[in-house]
Structure formats: C-alpha cells, structure tokens
Amino acid sequence: MRRSNLALVLRHVRDAGPRSRARIAVETGLNRGTVSSLVSELIDRGLVREGPVERGGSVGRPGQAVELDGRNIGGIGVEINVDYVTAIVLDLANTPVFEHRVALDVQALPPDAVLDAVTELAIKALSDCDERQITPVGLTLAIPALVERADGVVAFAPNLHWTQVEAVEGLRHRLSRPGPGVWGSPPRRQLPIQVDNDANLAALGEFAMGSRAGTQHLVYLTGETGVGGGVMVDGQLLRGAEGFSGEIGHMPLNPGGHLCGCGRRGCWETMVGLAALLRMAAAEDDPVRDPSLDLERRLAMVRDRADRGEPRTLDALKLVGEALGLGASILVNVFNPRVLVLGGYFASLGGYLLDPMLAELHARVIAPDACQVVLSTLGFTAAARGGAHVALEAVLDDPTLVPIRHT
Ligand SMILES: [Zn+2]
C-alpha cells in the first residue's frame, strides 16, 4: 500500500511538475499527513527534493514546492543498429549523464560478436554510473527488429541478419562474468534487462522528451538502413496483437522494385531507407557508402554536397523526399496524428527532404492541415533515450528500489 502510494506521488510530481504537498494531496486524493510522510521518504531516497515556494495556488497557504530529483539513479538505453551501437544513461529527469557511440559494421559480424561489443559499452556506462555514484536501475536494448519482449528474444531483424537471437539472456550472461570495474554497483547480473523495437522506443522517447513531448496522437518515423515507425494513439504506444506493429518500412509501395532486407521486393524502405538514398546519390566506392565510417560524418558529407548544389545528390534527396511523402500520406490518412516526427537521417537531411515530402503529403492526405511534420531534435539518440526512459519506469512503479541515503 505504502509502496503504491510512494509510486503515485512520485509519478504525479514527475508528470505534473513541481507543486506543494497540499496540492499533491488534493490532486491525488491522499490525505495531507500521508503525503508529507511519503514526500519525506521520497526525499530520503533522493527521488524528489524541496523546490521553490509556491504562491498564489488555488489550494491553501503558499507552500514549499516539491520537485523531481533522481540525479542519483540512471536508466541505461543501448541501441544496436546496422552501422553503430550506442549507449546513453539518463537520470530520472531524463537528463543525459553518459553518452557513447561506436561505429560498428553489425551486418558483417555474428550476433555473439555484436553482443560482446554491446557488453563492453554497457560496462563503460555502468562504470561511469559508479564513478558518479548513480545507481543503475535497468537497461533496455533497442533493436531494429521484431521483438518477443516477454522472452527477451529478437525474432527477426532483417537488416542485422538476426533470427531468433536470445539478446537479453546473451547480455545478462556476459554482464555477470567477473570483470574489472563496477565495484560499488549492485551485482551486474541483477540489473533488469529488456529488449524492444528501436522505433517503438524512439516514439516513447519523443513522447517523453522530444520537442513535441506529450502529444497524444503522434507518429514517429525513423530513417536509417531500415525505416521504422512507432505510433502513439491517445498517449499509448500501438503494439498490435503480437507486438509487431509499426513495420511500416515494409509497406509494399513499389511492387517489383528493389530487393528489401526482408526478402520481398519494393518495400517502402527500398525507396527511402539510407541505402536507397546513398545508392541514388553516390557511386559504390564513394566514402559516404562506407559503413566503417561514422554515420553522422557520412551524412554531413551528403549535406555538404547538397549545400554546394551537387546535382546527383540534390536529385536523390528530392526523390527520397517525394517517396517519403507518399508513404507518410498513408500513415497520416490511417492514424490522423497531430504530429509526425521525422527521426534518424530524415531529421539530419530534413532541410532537403521536407519540401518535396510536404508537397506529396498535401496532395494525398484528406485532412493535411490537422498534422504537423517536425524534425526530431533527439537525432540518432531517440531510441537509446527511449530505452533509458523505459528502464527508469521501474523506479516510478516501485520507488523503494532506490535505497534510502545515509548522509
Ligand atoms: Zn521489406
């Protein structure tokens, strides 16, 4: 009972913002004495702190506001993508405290070698937490794949060439091996680990901390080697019967077209994925098509060529923008989102993709003015941030996971 009331108060302060104990009592329906005691315990656990004095509220006398703290805990998000692995640690207020990306040609490596690299990155993140006296509360793996979340299994990741990989168990096993560092942390084998689709996590990240956070009807589209999507309806992620919804990259928009990583022909991804853009924009031996180079560096080269008016690059960007609008018009007609967020490379090259895309959207969407298209401000970190955010949910469900501080 007390645990669920602690959770209720903590979540309320996070979602509704700083407010007095009196106001928390009114808004949660708990009595004032109970709220005071719960807040004291949350302060002892470092999850909330005393904030500014609140004046002019509708409830009672001015009171000292209580605000979110949680600088002492960290959620870890690790993304595996075709060209890189990246890790990010967020504190309870979603502030990044650690961020690291490694260029990795994941397609060329067996899953075991990729999980070794992920483990190394996770240990780096855990050691960093340890140095900063941050308690890690969970880790979420973000993967461009159909994921069986309950079993922690990657069922099928067409662009990584993974089938039935036990990702969670593989990572847990590696992290529990004795190794250097992480002395003060709880044993690594106890760290809760989960796995989810990268675009779903990115959509949750946008919903929690993007430029249009809190938008109840939001469609997130990400362009990397694959093209993924996450759909928020009434503030909830749409998962579908098996949890496999959002596979929008495989909408068959050009039947008979190029071969897709999924084995079919003419999927949307073969028209607007990163490989499609680079195929149209550059010759095969061009460095922008070299996966061992950092992705953002390659995209900066493409942007630079476009800025200089290089015709092949500009033509490629226009074609991709139009094809992006074609597929997006289906999503906007089906889901009627308030906001469509473009992530991944769609955001990095948005300046060139947006005009042809919007022209296509306006021509094809029944009610185009109801939806605003924005470029993600989270860039390539959206999925890892979403993963870290989801890992922190454990504390919002059970604040007693964080020990009382003895200072
Ligand atoms: Zn496909």
Image (tube, helix red, strand yellow):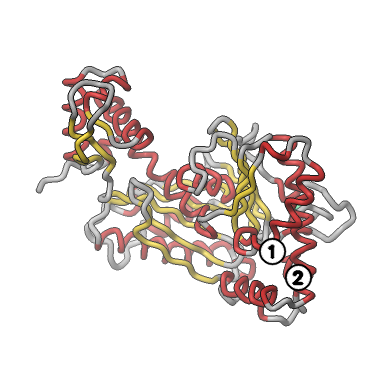
Q: Which of 227 and 339 is in front in this view?
A: 339
Find residue 90 and report its horizontal and vertical position in percent: 37, 52
- Horizontal placement of 292 versus 54: left or right? right
Residue where numbered disc 1 is placed: 352
Residue most toward the left? 407
Q: Which of marks 2 and 1 is nearer the N terminus?
A: 2
Residue where numbered disc 2 is placed: 314
Q: Report helix, strand or loop for mark 1.
A: helix
Find residue 82 and report its horizontal and vertical position in percent: 61, 64
Q: Do the residues labelled 2 and 1 touch (CB within 8 Å)?
A: yes
| Quarter-of-image position of residue 293 | bottom right
| Quarter-of-image position of residue 46 | top left
Find residue 331 and report its horizontal and vertical position in percent: 72, 41
Q: Nearer the viewer, residue 281 or 133?
A: 281
29, above or below 372, in the image: above
- Horizontal placement of 237 versus 321: left or right? left
